[in-house]
Image (cartoon, rainbow, N blue to C red):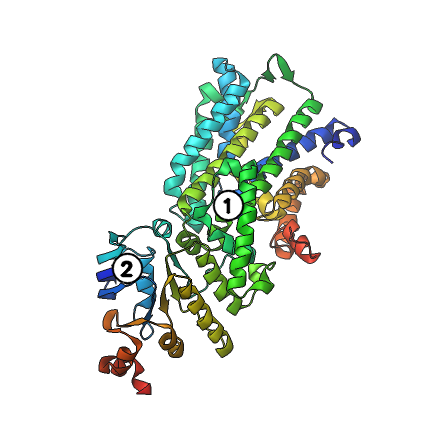
């Protein structure tokens, strides 16, 4: 389906929308591994996305780094930061964990806003085109193929991971932490690992976003973006790979579809989310799968 | 030599002395029961030995090696398994996956290999799935082989916990009230199951309120009362012990 999409989409507006959907889908997949499967919350993931985006903006512009190298550096930095803070954070649970990750996201956002000599501050900064071996990614069609490939690989890897000893341990510590501890699961290590993995997913896709859009602003890393990502997980369905895709597609498309409401689109957006949560508390895909008797 | 050796074990929660100066030892291959009135400290004792709580004082030795205060996963590595009085089943997983989690330490848990679905991982997982199905057969859960955990009745989940513990291939298994909440027929089935587990060479430590089951299965019995050791001995000795009769079996004597 991903392969035929660019040929049926009527114009570049829809190609652009599809690319942004796919980028969000990859981030939401990673976040769903953390939230839906492992049962841990993060309200700061846009911060990690921001690190990736700004690594891809700052390192090539100010230091002349190769964009691919900059992207990887952003991912490594994000991974290290996530691992460093995760150990103490994952001694916390529930509301406290939510607060700690929220704080982390806000700190990253403030850092990006304040370091104006490097980041352009609140105004943001342009990002050079993504080039590799003399070949530059410019047209939307090219970007579409890159992003579609990334999404396909992410879905495949996520499905593999969930159905593996690692994935079972993650789901088990969600189901019963004490039971997984006594069968030998080092629960803190697993929580840290999946937190780092999902943060790196976000960072890489942050870099992709930066190159694709060609411009970064601190809004990319702000609290509202973190909430939007979590909402995509919840609406699509916790602990559901396909739910992540649906959540990302719907919530990326919804603001466009609601644009006709003019000043009221935010209200309509909120109302739709509330209705979804009231009638589909487990999210779209798990609720519908249960209804039609299909196990995922 | 004793498999498990507990000496002067105590834990205090603030002013509450839940377990006080308890000593006993368990020989390999036996069924050892811990009994006592509600709140006597039986589950707390289990939590201490399986690493869920850290002792305030005292020593626990497994094969002569001190294990007091070690984390549950370190104890799991040494072959200590347990079940829970209040069910601890992962309701977000299928029945057979719950059993497979029990084999966690015997598997390659590498994240990258798992994400790439390397043949070494899938082959081992397929073997394990068959092994888990066999364990479900062993505990009498054949008909739930394809079931989701959250669709199973309480009695079946109690046995699913035993299957998960057995998947660890433990040397020592702690069963915390395996027959609690079961009807008489199910209780007899669990009685037989515990016997089968013991016959397979695993040392069993049992907490149970069903006296018939305890007397029937146990090689030795420890009686706790208010966190203290009241008596220890064979079923016959315990039955005759005047302190035990006064504190616990009083109503029946």
Q: Is the residue B25 above or below the residue A155 in the image?
A: below
Q: Are marks 1 and 2 on the same chain?
A: no
Name the one closer to the observer, A16 or A274. Answer: A16
Q: Residue B210 at x, y = what percent?
A: 40, 76
Q: Residue A165: which disc? A: 1
Using a 10 Å C-alpha cutoff, classify the residue at mark 2 as few (fewer than 14 neighbours), some (14 to 19) or many (20 or more).
many
Chain letter belonging to callout 1: A
Name the one closer to the observer, B183 or A187. Answer: B183
Q: Residue A254 at x, y = what percent?
A: 68, 41
Task: Give the foreground label among 1 and 2.
Answer: 2
**Which quarter shows the N terminus of chain A?**
top right
Q: Is residue A135 left or right of residue A180?
A: right
Chain letter belonging to callout 2: B
Q: Is residue A272 left or right of residue B235?
A: right
Task: Check disc 2 and report its element: helix, strand or loop.
Answer: strand
Name the one closer to the observer, B220 or A86. Answer: B220
Q: Residue A230 at x, y = what percent?
A: 55, 43
Task: Check disc 1 and report its element: helix, strand or loop.
Answer: helix
Q: Residue A259 at x, y = what percent?
A: 70, 38
């Amino acid at each position: 389906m991903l392969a035929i999409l660019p040929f049926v989409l009527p114009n570049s507006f829809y190609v652009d929308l599809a690319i942004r959907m796919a980028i969000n889908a990859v981030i939401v997949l990673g976040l769903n591994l953390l939230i839906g499967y492992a049962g841990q919350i993060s309200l700061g993931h846009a911060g990690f996305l921001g690190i990736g985006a700004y690594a891809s903006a700052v390192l090539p512009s100010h230091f002349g780094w190769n964009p691919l190298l900059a992207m990887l550096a952003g991912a490594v930095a994000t991974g290290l930061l996530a691992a460093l803070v995760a150990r103490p954070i994952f001694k916390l649970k529930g509301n406290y964990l939510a607060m700690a990750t929220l704080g982390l996201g806000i700190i990253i956002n403030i850092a990006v806003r304040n370091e104006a000599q490097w980041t352009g501050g609140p105004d943001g900064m342009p990002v050079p085109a993504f080039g590799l071996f003399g070949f530059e990614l410019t047209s939307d069609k090219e970007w579409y193929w890159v992003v579609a490939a990334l999404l396909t690989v992410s879905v495949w890897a996520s499905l593999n991971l969930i159905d593996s000893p690692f994935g079972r341990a993650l789901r088990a510590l969600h189901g019963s932490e004490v039971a997984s501890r006594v069968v030998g699961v080092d629960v803190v290590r697993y929580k840290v690992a999946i937190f780092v993995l999902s943060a790196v997913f976000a960072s890489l896709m942050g870099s992709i976003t930066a190159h694709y859009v060609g411009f970064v602003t601190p809004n990319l890393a702000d609290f509202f973006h973190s909430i939007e990502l979590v909402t995509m997980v919840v609406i699509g369905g916790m602990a559901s790979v396909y739910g992540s895709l649906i959540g990302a597609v719907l919530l990326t498309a919804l603001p466009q579809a609601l644009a006709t409401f003019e000043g009221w689109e935010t209200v309509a957006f909120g109302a739709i989310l509330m209705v979804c949560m009231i009638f589909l508390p487990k999210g779209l895909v798990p609720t519908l799968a249960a209804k039609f008797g299909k196990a995922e | 030599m004793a498999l498990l050796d507990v000496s002067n074990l105590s834990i205090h929660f603030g002013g509450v002395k839940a377990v006080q100066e308890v000593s006993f030892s368990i020989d390999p291959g036996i069924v050892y029961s811990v009994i006592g009135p509600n709140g006597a400290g039986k589950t707390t004792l289990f939590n201490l030995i399986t690493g869920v709580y850290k002792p305030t004082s005292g020593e626990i030795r497994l094969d002569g090696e001190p294990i007091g205060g070690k984390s549950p996963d370190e104890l799991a590595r040494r072959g200590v398994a347990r079940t829970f009085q209040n069910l601890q089943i992962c309701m977000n997983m299928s029945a057979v996956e719950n059993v497979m989690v029990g084999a966690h330490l015997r598997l390659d848990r590498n994240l990258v290999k798992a994400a790439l679905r390397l043949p070494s991982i899938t082959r081992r997982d397929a073997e394990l799935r068959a092994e888990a199905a066999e364990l479900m057969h062993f505990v009498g859960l054949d008909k739930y082989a394809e079931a989701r955990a959250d669709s199973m009745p309480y009695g079946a989940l109690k046995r699913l916990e035993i299957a998960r513990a057995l998947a660890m291939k433990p040397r020592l298994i702690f069963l915390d009230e395996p027959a609690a909440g079961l009807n008489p027929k199910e209780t007899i089935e669990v009685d037989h199951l515990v016997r089968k587990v013991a016959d397979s060479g695993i040392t069993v430590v049992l907490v149970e309120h069903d006296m018939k089951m305890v007397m029937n299965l146990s090689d030795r019995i420890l009686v706790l009362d208010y966190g203290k050791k009241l008596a220890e001995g064979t079923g016959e000795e315990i039955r005759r012990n005047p302190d035990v009769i006064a504190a616990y079996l009083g109503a029946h004597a």
